[in-house]
């Protein structure tokens, strides 16, 4: 059976009150829909940790810095509900736009530090949009725990910082990236790639993991990074936006993996922007 879809905050709050009265723990899994096994792994983790699971589906206009990307973003609510059916989700919250941004909405949640580089630098306003909508979803759902993918590792850190700074009583849990057999990180945007491009995109993860191994052995990023950049372009990517080695905790840029670190990449293929990251 598919879970009930709720579109109004008042109805969500009514459910939530019943659950809290019964002493139940509530999880939220925020998504923009077009669900794939990566999203479903978050739902599974949420279900294992909490009594009740709310999956939210909201294509948040405020986090798209590119109107074309927003217009092209896949919207598959009916299929999403069917995919969620086996997971025992309690509510699918698909808020009507005015439930998130009522008339006259004028507030922005803006995180500095971990939001400044990489995605924050390349997509101006993106993390303000993310932090604003996620703050609202945390407050609206009143969840005890929220589940996010390491696929968007910088987003995970931004959201965690935001919840701590604003004293929102929620634990932000990070879950590993789910990949295709080739290593390609699953993403709703992969749907826009041709079969040939999907095959080319499979080259990205092995290049990253090879570089991570070299860095873990003490290699110098300035030198090795250049070779990896060339390999990414040689694999057929049209453009590389960044390849960065950063501290895993505060995302400061590193020249070598002299502390727990992560490699981050954003690259374009067939007008689709793909991002990925791996631990070093
Ligand atoms: P999105 O719908 O793309 O905004 O993603 C919703 C959530 O799913 C975010 O926490 C993402 O990090 C997470 N997610 C997306 N793709 C993957 C993946 N391949 N593996 C794990 N989590 C993912």
Image (spheres, grey):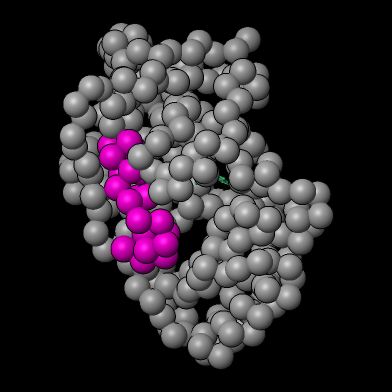
Identify which residue, 50 or 10, lies in the foreground: 10
For the point 53% across and 52% down, which residue is it? Answer: 151
Please indicate whether residue 203 sits to the left or right of residue 27 in the image: right
Q: Nearer the viewer, residue 268 or 144?
A: 268
Is residue 148 in sight in this rendering?
Answer: no
Q: Nearer the viewer, residue 127 or 28?
A: 127
In magenta, the rendered stretch is 116-135
Report which quarter residue 216 is drawn in. bottom right
Residue at 61 percent across and 45 percent down: it is: 189
- In the rendered structure, the answer to whether residue 224 lies left or right of residue 253 reads right
Q: Is residue 196 visible?
A: yes
- Residue 74 lies, in percent from the top left, at 59, 33
Circle count: 0
- Taking the spot 61% from the left edge, 25% from the top edge, the residue there is 76
Vertical position of residue 41 compared to residue 56: above or below: below
Which corner quadrant of the image does residue 169 belong to?
top left
User: What is the magenta segment's predominant secondary structure?
Assistant: helix
Q: Is residue 120 magenta?
A: yes
Answer left or right for 148 relative to 74: left
> Where 64 sits versus 90, above or below?
below
Question: Would residue 130 appear left or right of 181 to someone viewing this image?
Answer: left
Against 33, residue 102 (above or below) is above
Residue 62: image x %, image y %? 35, 39
Q: Quadrant of the N terminus?
A: top right
Q: Is residue 195 magenta?
A: no
Q: Residue at x 28, y 27 (%)?
A: 101
Q: Position of residue 5 (x, y in %)?
A: 49, 13
Looking at this view, name the residue that lies furthest to the front: 68
**What x and y, as percent, mark residue 57?**
47, 27
């Amino acid at each position: 059976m598919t879970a009930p879809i709720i579109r109004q905050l008042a109805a969500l709050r009514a459910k939530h009150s019943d659950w809290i009265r019964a002493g139940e723990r509530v999880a939220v899994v925020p998504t923009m829909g077009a669900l794939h096994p990566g999203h479903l792994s978050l739902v599974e983790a949420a279900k294992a940790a909490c009594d009740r699971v709310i999956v939210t589906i909201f294509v948040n206009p405020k986090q798209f810095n590119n109107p074309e990307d927003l217009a092209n973003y896949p919207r598959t609510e009916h299929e999403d509900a069917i995919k969620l059916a086996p997971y025992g989700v309690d509510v699918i919250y698909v808020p009507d736009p005015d439930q998130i941004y009522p008339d006259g909405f004028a507030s922005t949640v803006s995180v500095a530090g971990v939001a400044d580089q990489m995605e924050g630098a390349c997509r101006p306003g993106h993390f303000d949009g993310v932090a604003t909508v996620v703050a609202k979803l945390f407050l609206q759902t009143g969840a005890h725990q929220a589940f996010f993918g390491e696929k968007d590792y910088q987003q995970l850190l931004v959201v965690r910082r935001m919840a701590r700074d604003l004293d929102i009583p929620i634990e932000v849990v990070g879950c590993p990236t789910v990949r295709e057999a080739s290593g390609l990180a699953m993403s709703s945007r992969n749907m826009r790639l041709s079969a040939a491009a999907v095959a080319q995109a499979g080259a990205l993860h092995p290049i990253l993991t090879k570089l991570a191994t070299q860095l873990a052995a003490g290699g110098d990023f300035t030198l090795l990074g250049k070779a990896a950049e060339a390999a990414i372009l040689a694999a057929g990517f049209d453009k590389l936006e960044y390849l960065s080695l950063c501290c895993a905790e505060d995302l400061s840029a590193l020249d070598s993996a002299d502390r727990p670190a992560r490699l981050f990449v954003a690259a374009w293929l067939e007008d689709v922007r793909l991002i990925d990251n791996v631990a070093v």
